[in-house]
């Protein structure tokens, strides 16, 4: 007879723990919820406006990219 689902799940969890892993629960925004897309647009506009107002941001980003890429300026 096949093992019960709960027994298979427990075996999998035991194997993961034996491999040095532990379970972790993460809560994320529900993208199916009403208003989610509108809130994403609102936050994106806030960020875009802040970036447009920051004259030093483009230079900072270029320098950071060059640093990560190993490009000499």
Image (cartoon, rainbow, N blue to C red):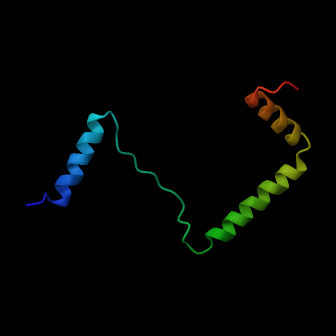
Q: Position of residue 57 (x, y in %)?
A: 85, 41
* 21 vs 47: above or below: above
Residue 68, how many percent across, how many down? 73, 30
Quadrant location of the C terminus in the rendered image = top right
Q: Quadrant of residue 35?
A: bottom right
Camera-side residue of 36 and 10: 10
* Quadrant in which the N terminus is drawn: bottom left
Seen at 25% across and 47% down, the residue is: 12
Name the outermost residue toward the bottom.
34
User: What residue is drawn where x is 78% and y is 58%?
Assistant: 46
Question: Where residue 61 appears, x then y in whole percent?
Answer: 81, 38
Q: Is residue 55 left or right of residue 11?
A: right
State the residue in front, 58 or 12: 12
What x and y, as percent, mark residue 17? Answer: 28, 38
Number of marks: 0
Q: Residue at x 65, y 69 (%)?
A: 37
Could you tell me which residue is drawn at 75 percent across and 30 percent down? 69
Q: Quarter of the image holding residue 70? A: top right
Outermost left residue: 1
As drawn, 66 above or below 27: above
Q: 67 or 54: nearer the eye?
A: 67
Quarter location, residue 18: top left
In the rendered view, tell whether residue 64 sits above or below residue 13: above
Q: Is residue 54 left or right of residue 13?
A: right
């Amino acid at each position: 007879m096949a093992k019960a689902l709960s027994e298979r799940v427990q075996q999998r969890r035991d194997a993961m723990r034996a491999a040095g892993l532990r379970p972790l629960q993460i809560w994320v925004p529900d993208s199916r919820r009403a208003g989610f897309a509108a809130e994403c647009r609102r936050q994106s506009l806030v960020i875009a406006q802040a970036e447009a107002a920051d004259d030093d941001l483009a230079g900072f980003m270029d320098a950071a990219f060059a640093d990560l890429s190993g490009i000499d300026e």
